[in-house]
């Protein structure tokens, strides 16, 4: 997200156990996302959560956790949806808050679940973060192995704890409006090697 559209070189280096390194050089095309724009009014008692330092500190925390690499892979095939609700804000949409400039970007997908409705683990994995954050509110993060993580935010309740292993479809929390939220919904993120990516792509496709 935020990468300028164009053609970029990509070099892959693979070294089998006890073998010689193999290198592939290819070009990849990055296309314009055309995600649209949202204008959001945040209640006055939460306006302090718009401070850039608050947002950057929280992103740094998520990057620090999601750059960890677990060689054991728990996921297999496409991920499941984390809530039985309509998605009302996709990944990549640009945002303006309280009449300010359009200078923020949505790095997850929002599901308009009713307050208290179930939040489900999208794939098997281990809980590596269970905390209350400023922007994401009551938050869970699951490590699925191979550098892949999912984040579940704005929860009203957490039903699993740090270190717990969860299975696909397990109820891990409840939809809420904690943190920087204007109403009850689930904010769901997928991170790969410290980078937030479009979570819905992981629902549609199975990555090797």
Image: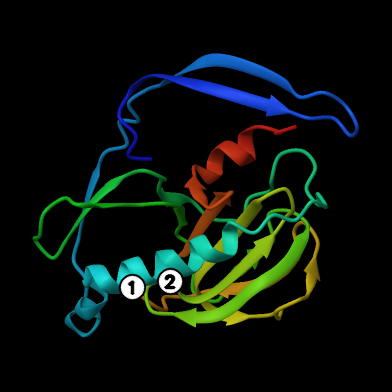
Q: Secondary structure at mark 2?
A: loop
Q: Secondary structure at mark 1?
A: loop
At 66% from the left and 50% from the top, the residue drawn is 147
Residue at the far right: name it. 18
Residue 122 % position (x, y): 68, 54
Q: Which mark is residue 136?
A: 2
Give whichever of discs 2 and 1 has the lower sequence position.
Answer: 2
Residue 196 % position (x, y): 48, 49
At 52% from the left and 22% from the top, the residue drawn is 10
Mark 1: few, some, or many residues within 10 Å (few <14, many ≥20)?
A: many
Mark 2: few, some, or many residues within 10 Å (few <14, many ≥20)?
A: many
Q: In the image, 55: left or right of 125?
A: left
Q: Compare residues 194 and 162 and report the one nearer the observer.
A: 194
Q: In the image, 110: left or right of 52?
A: right
Residue on which the image places disc 1: 180
- Mark 2–mark 1 Cα distance, whole angstroms, equals 6 Å
Residue 78 % position (x, y): 71, 39
Q: In the image, 128: left or right of 182?
A: right
Query: Decide: marks 2, 1 in contact (CB < 8 A)?
Result: yes
At 69% from the left and 80% from the top, the residue drawn is 159
Quarter holding the C terminus? top right
Can residue 61 be seen here? The reply is yes
Q: Compare residues 103 and 64 and report the one nearer the observer.
A: 64
Q: Compare residues 124 and 81 and report the one nearer the observer.
A: 124
Residue 174 % position (x, y): 58, 74
């Amino acid at each position: 997200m935020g990468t300028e559209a164009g053609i970029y070189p990509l070099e892959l280096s693979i070294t089998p156990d006890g073998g010689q390194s193999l290198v592939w050089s290819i070009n990849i095309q990055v296309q314009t996302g055309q995600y649209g724009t949202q204008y959001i009014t945040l209640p006055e008692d939460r306006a302090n959560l718009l401070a850039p330092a608050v947002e950057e500190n929280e992103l740094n925390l998520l990057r620090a956790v999601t750059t960890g690499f677990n060689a054991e892979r728990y996921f297999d095939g496409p991920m499941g949806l984390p809530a039985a609700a309509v998605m009302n804000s996709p990944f990549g949409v640009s945002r303006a808050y309280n009449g300010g400039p359009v200078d923020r970007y949505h790095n997850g997908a929002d599901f308009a679940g009713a307050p208290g409705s179930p939040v489900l683990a999208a794939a098997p994995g281990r809980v590596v973060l269970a905390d209350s954050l400023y922007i994401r509110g009551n938050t869970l993060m699951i490590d699925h192995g191979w550098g892949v993580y999912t984040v579940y935010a704005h929860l009203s309740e957490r039903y699993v704890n740090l270190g717990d292993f969860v299975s696909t479809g397990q109820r891990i929390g409840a939809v809420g409006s904690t943190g920087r939220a204007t109403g009850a919904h689930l904010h769901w993120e997928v991170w790969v090697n410290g980078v937030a990516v479009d979570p819905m792509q992981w629902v549609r496709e199975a990555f090797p």
